[in-house]
Image (cartoon, rainbow, N blue to C red):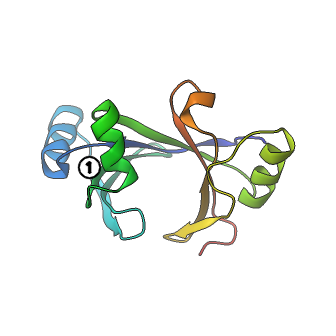
Amino acid sequence: MKAMRIDHISLAVKDLSKAREAYEKVLGLELDSTYVSEREKIRVARYYLGDVALELMEPTAPDSEVAKFIERRGEGVFVISYEVGDVDEALAELRKQGCKLIDEKVRHLLGARYAFTLHPKELCGVLTEVIDYRRGG
């Protein structure tokens, strides 16, 4: 699999309002957009630093993956997303390499196709996602 660039980095936060206030004040970030994902059970604020997005993600339910992450590890880097040419091809290549995948099927959100790939234990404690925008969903 060839990662072309970092698409976004997502931080798990307990309180989105407080996190936004801190990131906007301290780093001078300007909000690009916000969204809620019912499927992922998160509320998100998105910023851009050049071509890379920074997302602050607050869980909307105690059983969300972000809430579980915060419970286990506290706030911090939740996922790094790498753009690839084709998510299906990336998943197939990782399977061929013998990697145990988190997602076997592609997910869709906001015009993008993505999948969580390797367990954090396989890449230095960081959840990895691959994403493409070729055939959004």
The number of numbered badges drawn on the structure is: 1
Q: Dividing the picture into quarters, in which one does residue 81 lie?
A: top right
Task: Classify mark 1: helix, strand or loop.
Answer: loop
Residue pictured at 82% horizontal, 39% vertical: 98
| 19 left or right of 112 in image | left
Residue at image mark 1 = 30
Question: Percent from the top left, x then y, of residue 62?
Answer: 26, 55
Residue pictured at 56% horizontal, 69% vertical: 108
Front in this rendered view, residue 29 or 81? 81
| 62 left or right of 25 in image | right
| 99 left or right of 108 in image | right
| Kind of residue sitting beneath label 1 | Glu
Residue pictured at 50% horizontal, 46% vertical: 51
Residue pictured at 59% horizontal, 66% vertical: 107
Question: Percent from the top left, x then y, of residue 97?
Answer: 84, 38
Quadrant including the C terminus: bottom right
